[in-house]
Amino acid sequence: MAYKCSKEEEEFLKNYDESMFKHPSVTTDIVIFTVDENDKLSIPLIKRGVFPYKDRWALPGGFLHVGEESIDECARRELREETGVENVYLSQLYTFGEPDRDPRTVVISVAYIAHIPKGKLKVKAGDDAKDAEIFRIKYDIDGVVFTNDTTTIYENDLAFDHGKIIKMAITRLRNRLDYEDDAFDFLRDKNEFTISELKKIHETIKNRTLDLPNFRKTFLRDYVGTGKVIELDKTVVSKGKPAKLYKMTEGADKK
Amino acid sequence: MAYKCSKEEEEFLKNYDESMFKHPSVTTDIVIFTVDENDKLSIPLIKRGVFPYKDRWALPGGFLHVGEESIDECARRELREETGVENVYLSQLYTFGEPDRDPRTVVISVAYIAHIPKGKLKVKAGDDAKDAEIFRIKYDIDGVVFTNDTTTIYENDLAFDHGKIIKMAITRLRNRLDYEDDAFDFLRDKNEFTISELKKIHETIKNRTLDLPNFRKTFLRDYVGTGKVIELDKTVVSKGKPAKLYKMTEGADKK
DNA sequence: TCAAAAGTGTTTCCCATACACCCATGC
DNA sequence: GCATGGGTGTATGGGAAACACTTTTGA
């Protein structure tokens, strides 16, 4: 598969005129999903300090370091820089390339989705250097609304086309939940969790309640039955009957 | 606060530098699926006349005309230029951005999938100016192989990472068939088709035979029952009992 | 003893699959 | 007639959903 350069070709490459075509800027924007302490689906947004869209809220992201990194690496770097987290699920969502989506110049944005476990996403509160806050998501027929204790943001208030990107991300997240193991990414601890905790994550993302007996049945069949998850010899008790703890096995835990 | 200002300025300068000097090239590559006269899943490939990968087969595609068009429009323009067809299904697949995928410079490729109805895709045979040919696709555990009457191409013989792109496109196409109305895109005539014709397209894409009575049942329930398709007062006869003809209604016929 | 949450078992219904069988045409 | 493909009907099995019921804890 490796590409071998011939002498003739080397010569050609030397003379290749890079400026034959105009080149756009490329950024990655990341929809960083998490589940907060109150079991609400949340994402961090950043208040822009510069034009364009100064003082508007936007997705975390930044410019591709051309030649130094792949687009995936750029997204992972931005995610690390913005949140400090590593080794979490990160995958490409869609690429947006309307020529007028950024008033400065042509900026192509490759959007990504990240999954952060419950409790792992911190935003330095009161740090004035970067105004980043976590917002709860409400998504119904009227559109998306982002709220936290001090601020309410409507879909159309966001910078650029970020409202559209987030809506697409929510749809993708919800759809994938039916056939991928994404819910585990949001567990506080993949090595010690209860069935109810996992069910709560499904409910949070799908925004509807589920039947616990049926959820348990499919969980035992699809995960414990297949060896993706094993039952631990421990229980945890808060209120009511103590709950069995489960642990994801190594093989099933893809990042 | 001094710290805040310098931080903002830093970010601004970073973006400024990035956008002024380092820009990648952006191309679209299109996996143009069709079903040939012998009911084989096929795509056109183009033999490259220039470096890099001179004389290797590659996906149709080309550079984004930055500022003049969106990425979607670029893909649609390339599709029109390569095949002459318009008003067909075209959707984004994935964006590839490994820095070394093109030996010339950093080239970001936004891959698309197109669906061409049976019999609509023509390639000017013998046109020496552009060596484009249609290949049948065979995709099994050993990988993808492309064949026509004169040539056999293996996945790893393709230019760039186009083998990987095509494999991803086939997977997407097959998966979408289960929950989207994609099969209709490949019908010779969406305004006059038989159930068997539609079934054959499913079989071609999924590469397995289906049960006609069951296929009819679900077709009548999901399409005729919902008004997406209506039964015509005509039949067509070739061999055996004449077959009823169906027509897709306007509303259901998205492009 | 009661509330609350975990866990078990049962019933029902839908739907995909398999397949037996009949129908209308050309030869 | 008979081969060929179109079309109808029925039986079966698995899984999702709904829900009644039991168990184990803390208060």
Image (spheres, coloured by chain):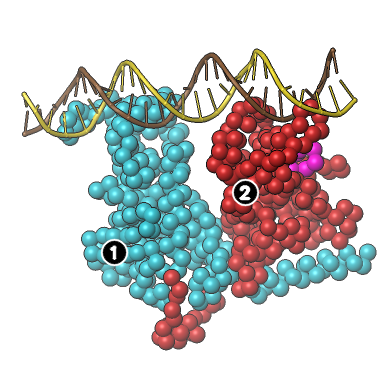
Chain colours: A red, B cyan, C brown, D yellow
Residue type, label 2:
Thr
- Do badges 1 and 2 share one subunit? no
Residue of label 2: A249
Residue A73 locus on image (x, y percent): 64, 64
Q: How many numbered callouts?
A: 2
Report the residue that reaches farthest toward the front.
A233
- In the picture, the disc for residue A45 is none
Name which residue lies at 36% across and 53% down.
B140
Q: As shown in the figure, which amino acid type bears the numbered disc 1?
A: Thr
Looking at the figure, which quarter contains the N terminus of chain A? bottom left
Q: Nearer the viewer, residue A109 or A137?
A: A137
What residue sits 57% from the left and 63% below the top? B67
- Residue occupying the point 44% across, 34% down: B252
Q: How far apart are marks 1 and 2 (CA)?
A: 43 Å
Give yes or no for residue A58 being in the magenta stretch.
Answer: no
Magenta stretch secondary structure, dominant:
loop
Q: Give the residue drawn at x 88%, y 57%.
A: A127
| Magenta range | A34-40
Q: Is mark 1 on a helix, strand or loop?
A: strand
Q: Position of residue A9 (x, y in %)?
A: 43, 83
Chain letter of disc 2? Answer: A
Q: Which residue is label 1 attached to?
A: B152
The magenta stretch spans residue A37: yes
Q: Do tag 1 and tag 2 residues touch (Cβ < 8 Å)?
A: no
> Chain for mark 1?
B
Decide: few, some or many residues near mark 1? Use Cα within 10 Å; few <14, some 14-19, many ≥20: few
